[in-house]
Amino acid sequence: MNNIIKLLLLSDLFVATGFGLIGPIFAIFVKDNIAGGTIFTAGVASTIYLLVKGITQLPFSRYVDKHDNKVGWLMIGAFLTVLTPILYLFSTNIYHIYAAQVLYGIGSALAFPTWLALWSINLDKKHEGYEWSLYSTATGLGTAGTAAIGGAIAEFIGFAYTLFFVAIISFIGWLILFGLRKKSIKEDGVRSAHYHKHRKLKGETQ
């Protein structure tokens, strides 16, 4: 498994694990802690996220396929995603939650296509099935483990602490992407050096 795949896997594992703390109890959080919050409005909030993500990521994915700087866009999208639990923490009414869901949707729309593109082009040959399965297993076990933990923290300490832990863990996942950026810059430099060397040798042979 190459380093880029390792970094992508580790970063997404932290983000998925972090959001696994709040995901199963999000509706309860909205209902019990937000003015105007009900089971229905929690469902509306989830719909807003999915609609914004679905509508935004399609045109953006076309852009990503035609341009470089995938790592940069991934970092921007992941950062917007990481901000979401902080916005939850300071929300006092349902419209704040709706706004947070819009930002969450945009962040996911930027991060998801770029993550998939980087993952796909860096998969090790003849190990694609294993690496996809490893990703699925790791993130599945991570979110499964944190679902109960998130509920326990909210029940015995409070939702504010749950959101705090979501923010911290997902922020660590975002920081891991800096290693990916350094790796990408290093590889771009190597490609550039090879390109100029090739041009120089070509000029010498003409």
Image (cartoon, rainbow, N blue to C red):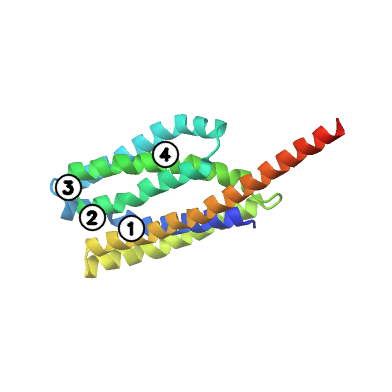
Contact check, label 3 and label 1, Cβ < 8 Å? no
Give the mark nearest the N terminus, 4 or 2: 2
- Check disc 3 and give the amino acid type: Gly
Sequence-wise first label, 3 or 1: 3
Disc 3/disc 4 C-alpha distance (Å):
26 Å
Type of residue at label 4? Ala
Secondary structure beneath label 1: helix
Alpha carbon distance from label 4 to label 2: 22 Å
Residue 201 x/y as whole percent? 81, 38
The residues bearing labels 3 and 1 have C-alpha atoms spaced at a distance of: 22 Å
Residue 177 placement (x, y as % from top left): 49, 53
- Which residue sits furthest bottom? 156
Q: Which mark is residue 37?
A: 3
Q: Earlier in the sequence, mark 4 or mark 1?
A: 4
Circle 2 is placed at which residue position? 89
Q: Compare marks 3 and 2 and give the one earlier in the sequence.
A: 3
Q: CA distance from mark 2 to mark 1?
A: 10 Å
Q: Secondary structure at mark 3?
A: loop
Residue 50: x and y in percent read: 36, 39
- Mark 3 or 2: in front is 2
Write down the residue under mark 4: 109
